Image: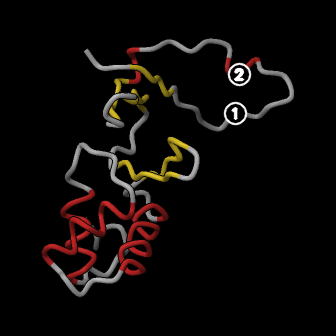
Amino acid sequence: MLRRSGIHPSAQRVAVAEYVLGTEEHPSADEVWARVKRRFPMISRATVYNTLHLFEKKGLLKGLAMAEGKMVFDPRTTPHHHFIDESTGRIFDLPWESLEVKNVGALQGYSVDSYQVVLRGRKK
């Protein structure tokens, strides 16, 4: 997958990819670093940050600002919405078809390229 995206698959990049591209979580860069560091104790935080941003640039991940000052990475790049459980902080993917948003194109004075709905509450 990395080669198909034009990314040289170094051992560190493969380790980051194995975790972040295979998870249903929405980890922050520090969470990715902590996880990958178990396998590669010498991996630097900068390497993980740079790798995540490279993956984002190549379309393998989406960076999402879900709370002020907190960026998370989503391996699911197809359209979908999110639900944040306020009691746990966990982020869940919601199918695109589960919500209906109307009249986005009719907003005057705005040119909308994309959108997503972020719901907050408690998962039952």
Question: Is 110 drawn above or below residue 53 in the view shown?
Answer: above
Label 2's element? helix
Which residue is the site of mark 2? Answer: 105
Query: Residue extending furthest front?
Result: 87
Residue 27: % across, % down? 33, 52
Query: Residue extending furthest right?
Result: 109
Amino acid type of the residue that numbered disc 2 sits on in the rendered structure = Gly
Tell me if 119 is positioned left or right of 109 in this view: left
Disc 1 packing (10 Å; few <14; some 14–19; many ≥20):
few
Mark 1 and mark 2 lie on one chain; the one further toward the N terminus is 2
Residue toward you, 76 or 121 = 121
Question: Is 6 drawn above or below residue 24 in the view shown?
Answer: below
Which residue is the site of mark 1? Answer: 112
Residue 87: % across, % down? 34, 28
Residue toward you, 102 or 18 = 18
Question: Is 97 drawn above or below residue 7 in the view shown?
Answer: above
Residue occupying image coordinates x 52% and y 30%: 116
Query: Residue extending furthest left?
Result: 39
**Quarter of the N terminus within the rendering:** bottom left
**Quarter of the C terminus within the rendering:** top left
Residue 107, quarter of the rendered image: top right
Residue occupying image coordinates x 40% and y 65%: 55
The mark total stands at: 2
Residue 2: % across, % down? 28, 70
